[in-house]
Image (cartoon, rainbow, N blue to C red):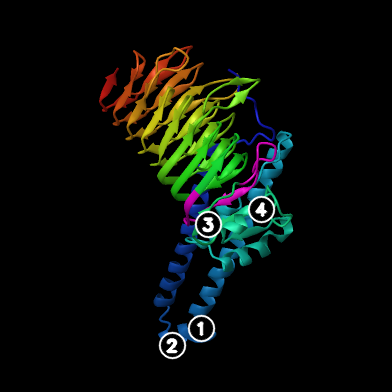
Amino acid sequence: MKCKKMQGEYKVNLQFKNKKKQKLKEKGITLIALVVTIIILLILAGVTLNMALSGDGLFNMARKAATDYNQKSVEEKLQILYAEKIMEDNDSNTKVKTDVTDVLEEMVGGEITEENIEEFNKLLEQYNEKVKGITTAGDLALIGTDENYPIDGVYVQLSNIDNLTTQIGSKEQPFKGIYNGNGKRIKNLNLTSEGDYTGMFRANEGTIKNVTIEDCEITSENGMVGGIAGQNAGLIENCTLSNGNITSNGGFFEDGQNVGSRVGGICGQNSTDGLIFECRNSALIKGSNQWTGGICGYNCSGNINKCLNNGGVKGLFGVGGIVGLSEKVNETNLCEVIDCINDGAINGEGTFDGKDTSCGGIAGIVRYESNVKNCENSGSVSGVGACVGGVAGYCSQNAVVYKSVNRGRIVRN
């Protein structure tokens, strides 16, 4: 089976990302230490409270100094971030979208507001960049369809959104920007599709993070179906799908052949270089064909790390609590499922094309040098035939499953 590599391949270095966040945190601690030190010195110097709090008092001077320091710190972080972007662009033909919302989150230290964005955009002017706030379902519908809402833009959700019925991007025009859900909710995501690539984002090559979707009803008559994205070749981080149903009633066709439903709670297919990190699903996932998973239906040379599934998963062939099928499809990329947990009930409801169900608490099928590591299943697993397992239903072609445990009940029908 082939997995076609999407254009504009998005490179993700998780280790570097974590180090960068740690550096930002350390600089925030340094700022606090500076203010505390100033206060202590004032006390030791015997400065009176009135002197300290007067208009030109030392406390106000210290506050202004701390504010100036914070702005300089933010400017420095942006300089570093865009310098990294230039180096990455020079190393490849891929335009890498710089995640400035990391710096914005650190600057604010909490929920991002419209005022925060206005202040931050002044610092971004020299980089020809701008953050846009999203407040309504109508705003979301403009992404990729209005020149003021480019498909590679930077967006922060500023309010809860109810009753979303439109999708962002397409297979031909995947999302290549940054979407930061900012801890806000999207309630009642209702999507019905006759074609492939169904999800809040049809296809993603950028960064989607901090998105929470409550109560979804997503139905496709074809394949490549997910709550966050139909297909992911970028980064999906800290996203949650709670309650509802995601259903594929058909399959995805490639070269005239039906190659599976590819349906999951977070995304239908996680393609080359795609990363799904710290995401959660509790919706019921149903596939009428191959490759059905609680987090992802088909993981091909992508990575799934630290994800949790609590939702039930039902399908015919290749059914897993985290992923239906995980396989490496090229020589240069890793393909791993690491540190994931499944608590949902997994049901292989029949055979497909004369094959056993092949269902597992973590993965239905693991093959072609893909790895499953440090995973845990406590959900029940039932299926037809011999290929029913607590962690993986079927493992072959140099794939490895290790340091993983099953605590769920296994039933072979």
Q: Looking at the picture, which amino acid does disc 2 mark?
A: Asn
Q: Is residue 135 left or right of residue 53?
A: right
- Segment tinted magenta in the rendering: 168-189
Q: Are marks 1 and 4 in contact (CB under 8 Å)?
A: no
Q: Which residue is mark 2?
A: 50
Residue found 41% across the figure and 41% down from its top: 281
Q: Which residue is mark 4?
A: 79
Give the answer, above or below, for where 237 lies relative to 6: below
Q: In the image, which disc is placed on residue 201?
A: none
Q: Magenta stretch containing residue 179, yes or no?
A: yes
Q: Secondary structure at mark 2?
A: helix
Q: In the image, which disc is placed on residue 57?
A: 1
Q: CA distance from mark 4 to mark 3?
A: 16 Å
Q: Looking at the picture, which amino acid does disc 1 mark?
A: Gly
Q: Magenta stretch containing residue 351, yes or no?
A: no
Q: Nearer the viewer, mark 2 or mark 3?
A: 3
Q: Secondary structure at mark 1?
A: loop
Q: Position of residue 315 (x, y in %)?
A: 42, 27
Q: Position of residue 70 (x, y in %)?
A: 56, 64
Q: Position of residue 186 (x, y in %)?
A: 49, 54
Q: Position of residue 259 (x, y in %)?
A: 56, 22
Query: Along the polypeptide, which appears first: circle 2 or circle 3?
Result: 2
Q: Are marks 2 and 1 in contact (CB under 8 Å)?
A: yes
Q: CA distance from mark 2 to mark 1?
A: 8 Å
Q: Nearer the viewer, mark 1 or mark 4?
A: 4
Q: In the image, which disc is placed on residue 105?
A: 3
Give the answer, above or below, for where 394 lies relative to 321: above
Q: Nearer the viewer, residue 309 or 319?
A: 319
User: Is residue 210 visible to us here?
Assistant: no
Q: Nearer the viewer, mark 4 or mark 3?
A: 3
Q: Are marks 2 and 4 in contact (CB under 8 Å)?
A: no
